[in-house]
Image: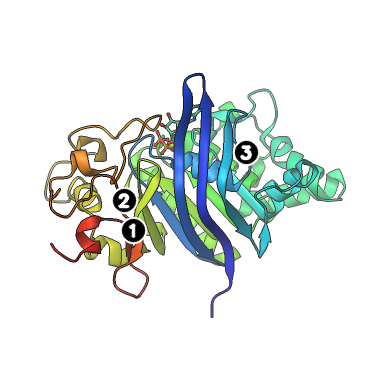
Amino acid sequence: MSEVLLEVQNLKTYFTITKGKVKAVDGVSFTLNKGESIGLVGESGCGKTTTALSVIRLLPKEGNVEGGKIIFEGNDITNLEEEKLSDFRWKEVSMIFQGAMNALNPVKRVCDQIAEPILLHEKISKTEAMKRVKELFELVELDTNLMYSYPHEFSGGMRQRAIIAMALACNPKLIIGDEPTTALDVMVQAQILDLINDLRKKLNMSMIMITHDLSIITETCDKVAIMYAGKIVELGETEEVVTNSLHPYTKMLISAFPNIYGERKMVDSIPGDPPDLYNPPEGCRFAQRCHMVNSKVCIPEESPPLIDYTGEGHFVACHLWRNSNV
Ligand SMILES: Nc1ncnc2c1ncn2[C@@H]1O[C@H](COP(=O)(O)OP(=O)(O)OP(=O)(O)O)[C@@H](O)[C@H]1O
Ligand SMILES: [Mg+2]
């Protein structure tokens, strides 16, 4: 039996704005085992980053977990005390933030930036920390002669490797990558994805991979959660979800997926817009854009629950499947 590392149970994370609340994450649940990887996929604004920031407990002040629980290694960390959070963030979970590549400090040497969290969270000397930085450079396949360089001397791919090295600095059990390859060109993107895959296996780390691009998930993740408007609409083993997708939204995502025979289309080419999460519609949030919507089955006032349709861990939240009437 695999050991559970993270359980997100009915997570509700809302942002308070002047006119009310933005329900950015509204009842999200998933489980991640040790060494396992899960992808969070969906259009811009569906709540991927907010889910991750809730797990790592790094929400901006207007954001708040208003419901549900986050269990990490059996401990409820939803209300973990402030003084324990910093260690938790580096030693248990670490995150490669959206756009992190450009977040390295331009006036500090790369080695000093990577050594910083090590010195802060491990009780070791500067010399030992530098030894660890050298090991990390080797781990992410960066030339150790470049340790003492400044970020501007690095290419985009090299900077992203340095960011990955920093995320691994304190040996976290879970790494979260928020669009970690988006800013890179296709060749470098493939190299970074290979590196992430290798590191995960070598270090037996769990991973949450956030992306718009389903093809990245098929390369890196055991499981996938398809998100739409603050909710998970489909969840399961990646291959199963991609080959036997159930939810109309997943089917649309897959058909918008770059295809070797056709021109490269982006996820954003799905017609229509997701609903405003300040005032989301009652019932199925995808109904207005769904080409399969059925007035007899799709109950307007009821939100479809996420159910295990196959009985083997392939979950879907859709009235059509719920009533097996497709
Ligand atoms: N600080 C904030 N204040 C108010 N609303 C916010 C804030 N941060 C995010 N939101 C809203 O929460 C929702 C989810 O945002 P989130 O950043 O999690 O989406 P995402 O899936 O990561 O999108 P993207 O793919 O563009 O990164 C969006 O409607 C967004 O506008
Ligand atoms: Mg995001």
Q: Secondary structure at mark 2?
A: helix
Q: Which residue is drawn at the image coordinates 84% and 46% (left, top)?
A: 127
Q: Earlier in the sequence, mark 3 or mark 2?
A: 3
Instruction: Give the quadrant of the C terminus.
Output: bottom left
Residue for point 57% across, 33% down: 63
Q: Is residue 185 left or right of residue 134?
A: left
- From the image, tell me which residue sits under label 2: 214
Residue 90 location in percent, x, y?
69, 48
Q: Is residue 152 left or right of residue 42?
A: right
- Give the amino acid at mark 3: Leu
Q: Position of residue 225 (x, y in %)?
A: 38, 55
Marks 2/1 in contact by CB < 8 Å: the verdict is: yes
In the rendered image of this protein, does residue 143 appear above or below residue 6?
Answer: above
Q: Is label 2's Cβ within 8 Å of ligand 1? A: no
Q: Is residue 138 in view from this perspective?
A: yes
* The furthest residue to the top: 18
Residue 191: % across, % down = 42, 50
Label 3: element kind? loop
Q: Please state, as top left, top right, bottom left or bottom right, where the N terminus lies in the image.
A: bottom right
Under circle 1, the secondary element is helix
Question: Which is more toward the observer, 71 or 67?
Answer: 67
Check disc 3: other Cα within 10 Å, few if <14, some if 14-19, many if 20+.
Answer: some
For label 3, the residue is 58
Please name the residue that numbered disc 1 is placed on: 218
Task: Establish if 210 lies above or below 92.
Answer: above
> Is 25 or 295 nearer to us in this picture?
295
What scheme was used to colour the molecule? rainbow
Whole-number angstrom distance, CA of label 3 to CA of label 2: 26 Å
Instruction: Check contact, mark 1 vs mark 3: CB within 8 A.
Output: no
